[in-house]
């Protein structure tokens, strides 16, 4: 059985985020499987095969990490 946990908290900030073909998913090794699942869901909805990187960069991106 696959489970996707709900976030403990969500903080809304001013601004906007546009998902484009240049968007990158940043994650650590522990969350690589979760990042791949997110990439697959987003690819189905947008057609964008977003790359997954382990090091934050300058590109617009989604950061997927667990807070210890």
Image: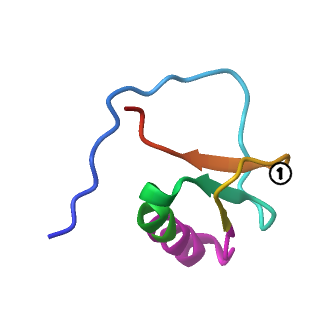
- Name the spot of residue 10 as percent of width and height, x first: 44, 27
Is residue 45 covered in magenta?
yes
Element under label 1? loop
Instruction: Specify the farthest residue to the left.
Output: 1
Q: Residue at x 67, y 69 (%)?
A: 50
Determine which residue is flagged by label 1. Answer: 59
Is residue 46 covered in magenta?
yes
Above or below, comparing residue 58 to residue 48 in the picture: above
Color encoding of the figure: rainbow
Above or below, comparing residue 65 to residue 2 in the picture: above
Q: Residue at x 60, y 46 (%)?
A: 63
Above or below, comparing residue 28 to residue 53 in the picture: above
Q: Residue at x 57, y 53 (%)?
A: 27
- Name the spot of residue 30 as percent of width and height, x first: 43, 56
Q: Residue at x 71, y 42 (%)?
A: 17
Question: Dot 1: few (<14), some (14–19), or many (≥20) neighbours within 10 Å?
Answer: few
- Name the spot of residue 7 as percent of width and height, x first: 35, 36
Q: Is residue 68 left or right of residue 19?
A: left
Instruction: Specify the farthest residue to the right.
Output: 58
Depth check: give the residue in front, 56 or 41. 56
- Name the spot of residue 11 as percent of width and height, x first: 50, 23
Determine the main secondary structure of the stretch shown in magenta: helix
Q: Which residues are magenta?
A: 37-51
Depth check: give the residue in front, 53 or 21. 53
Q: Quadrant of the C terminus?
A: top left
Q: Quadrant of the N terminus?
A: bottom left
């Amino acid at each position: 059985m696959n489970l996707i946990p709900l976030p403990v908290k969500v903080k809304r900030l001013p601004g906007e985020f546009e998902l484009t073909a240049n968007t990158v998913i940043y994650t650590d090794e522990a969350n690589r499987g979760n990042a791949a699942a997110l990439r697959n869901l987003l690819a189905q909805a947008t057609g964008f095969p977003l790359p997954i990187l382990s090091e934050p960069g300058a590109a617009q991106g989604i950061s997927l990490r667990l807070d210890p």
